[in-house]
Amino acid sequence: MMNISIRFLLLFFLFSTSVVISQNYRDKVIYETVYPSFQKARMDTEYYQKAKEAILGLEAQYGYETDLKLTLLEYSYRHKDITFFKEQLEILVEKYGYTISFMKGGELYYDAIFTGELSSWFKPMYLKKHFIWLEHNFDKQFDQRKLYDMELKSQAVHSFASKIMEIKSLDSFQIEAVNAKLNEFKFSNSTTLYGICRKFDFFPSVKNFAVIHSFYNMGLYQNLEIKENIERTWLLFEPYIKKAYLKNDIDYGEYRNYDAFCIKHFGFQKYGLITKESLPLFLRNKDYDEFSAIPIENAFFAEKMKREFGWK
């Protein structure tokens, strides 16, 4: 299972937008308009339309926003914007490998497309469009499966480790040994993701790789959470993250989360993306009260990266 601090941190930085000190235009729209609108779009049509318009505006400059459209699908169906829902799902199947094999079953429209009111449309559309995607992306199928299995493997091992930790007779040395083995497993498990980065020469996302309905970059975050793993993990993945970010295939969330975990482990950040006000409570240290801002390891490096990435 995902560590609760990772879950909280990712959700916090996904939707926390009130105090942000460095973004480019695309990041700004995503974090200050799209994500806050998503929070309220479930019950409010006005916010659904606001998110939809913002995403379509981004697409005019940066190309199809696959990950944002996946979330928007839920709200399109909820608010009965069915024509738009169908258009987007067709694009996701044909162009981005939306595959029913990896659906979780909890999607709001799951029953509708399999057995409900949209099933007569969905089945022939899916068979036609999916084979078009396969024709051009056949080699990605095995990698899709590997990424999906990586998450399942992680969940199984974490569940087993949790059961071991419940044994009351364990002493501190045994607990430390279990944690050490678990940390090594997390790093080893991330080599699946790293192998795909090397194969395609970019950090995979639903925009540049394929939709697999799985939070497969959790293999990255699980290692950033571990002090002994964070630097060796970032050393492996950051060059590929950078390539994907500069091509607008991902937003700056990977860098922002790395800064947050650095603060947790070392008391400073590297890229200067976190303010005192935006820092989650569980990461705060009383020593930060003495500073006007969260310390940056190397201010010259941070400024150099901000210029390179267009962060303002």
Image (cartoon, grey):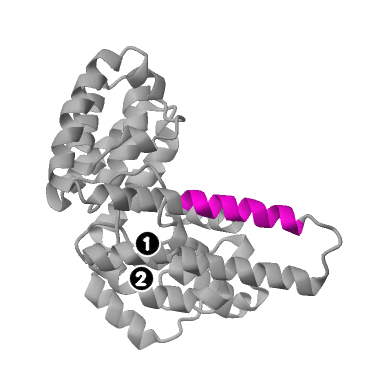
Q: Position of residue 115 (x, y in %)?
A: 37, 15
The correct choice, above or below, for 273 with respect to 302 in the image is above
Q: Position of residue 117 (x, y in %)?
A: 32, 12
Q: Nearer the viewer, mark 1 or mark 2?
A: 1
Left-right relation of 198 to 112 = left
Rendered residue at 32%/49% (across/down): 144
Q: Nearer the viewer, residue 270 or 203?
A: 203
Q: Are marks 1 and 2 in contact (CB under 8 Å)?
A: yes
| Quarter occupied by the C terminus | bottom left
Q: Nearer the viewer, residue 191 or 253?
A: 191
Q: Amino acid at mark 1?
A: Leu
Residue 5 lies in magenta, yes or no?
no
Left-right relation of 108 to 170 = left
Taken as a whole, is the magenta stretch helix, strand or loop? helix
Task: Give the CA separation, mark 1 to mark 2.
Answer: 9 Å
Left-right relation of 284 to 216 = right
Q: Nearer the viewer, residue 7 or 151?
A: 151
Instruction: Say the numbered circle drawn on residue 237.
Output: 2
Q: Which residues are magenta?
A: 151-165
Instruction: Say the numbered circle drawn on residue 34.
Output: none
The correct choice, above or below, for 176 with respect to 157 in the image is below
Near mark 2 (Cα within 10 A), the count class, few <14, some 14-19 or many ≥20, is some
Helix, strand or loop at label 2? It is helix
Helix, strand or loop at label 1? It is helix
